[in-house]
Image (cartoon, grey):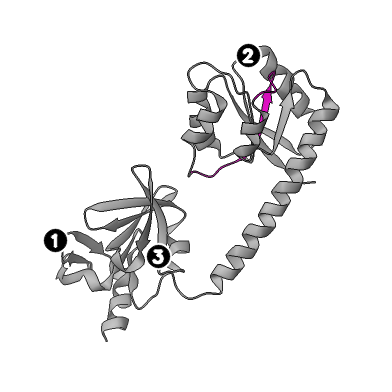
Amino acid sequence: MTSLRVLVIDDEPPARRKLTLLLRQEPGIEIVGEAANGIDAVAAIEEHRPDAIFIDIQMPGMNGFEVLDAIEGERMPQVVFVTAYDQHAVKAFEVHAADYILKPFDRTRLQSCLARLRGEHDSMQSKIKGLLDQFRSRDYLTRVVVKSRGRVLFLKIEDVDWIETSANYVELHSGKHSYLLRGTLTNFEERLNPRQFVRVHRTTIVNIERIQELQPWSHGDFIIVLKDGAKLRMSRRYRGNLSDIWG
């Protein structure tokens, strides 16, 4: 049975208690958190990255639809609206909600919803795997999708000067701008053309076209000076990567 990581969002404590109690009785359900308002909901979604959220619509400060607007562009979970009002149903499905549960509801209704969530989750995972398999069979990355000030940009890989690891992200530096992408530096390196990008440190990859000069530093390490004046450290361990390219 497919496991689901679930977040419960409702400003009424009795409603949250009832829903979490029913969810805990179902196999394969992990409740990763709760939220009592829209602002906390956005933070919890970004922190826990749940597979699905059960969310009320009418909440003080930020309603359920506004929560979805706030996380647009992030990893969107499956959405189940749980509300006492039926007038929002059309809008709910316009934002691609997986289900719309009217209060009060019973365990049978919840089980029907969970079956739908599991089916859609399995279907999505299968689609994602297929897309990843197709992607990995292609040539090296030529562009990536990044976010900047609420906009979605298509960044050409050739315009990236250097890349570094940043916690659970990689940070791409392009001119005066930088962009974060979730993932590890090693996984990202595997998708880059090794004739264009080389690892020069365990935390750093550089576009060789941006290198101006190398300066000896200490203990066999070097300082890489880029054409824009940025300086990066190249450790002795990775020195051979540039030697292989430059002969």
Numbered tag placed on residue 190 in the rendering: none
Disc 3 versus disc 1: nearer the observer = 3
Query: Quick one: label 3 or label 1, which is nearer the N terminus?
Result: 3
- Residue 44 in view, yes or no: no
Are the two marked residues, 2 and 1, in contact with CB atoms closer than 8 angstroms?
Answer: no
The residue that disc 2 covers is 12
**What residue do we see at 66% from left, 59% from top?**
127
Q: Give x and y (percent) for residue 109.
A: 82, 29
Q: Quadrant of the C terminus?
A: bottom left
Corner quadrant of residue 145? bottom left
Tell me the SS state at disc 3.
strand
In this rendering, the answer to whether 149 lies above or below 244 is above
Q: Which amino acid does label 2 sit on?
A: Glu
Q: Does the magenta stretch include residue 76?
A: yes
Numbered tag placed on residue 229 in the rendering: 1
Left or right, residue 73 beside residue 214: right
Tell me the distance, in whole angstroms, between the alpha carbons under discs 2 and 1. Answer: 56 Å
The magenta region covers: 74-87
Q: Which amino acid does label 3 sit on?
A: Arg
- Mark 1 crowdedness (10 Å alpha carbons): few <14, some 14-19, many ≥20: few
Corner quadrant of residue 229? bottom left
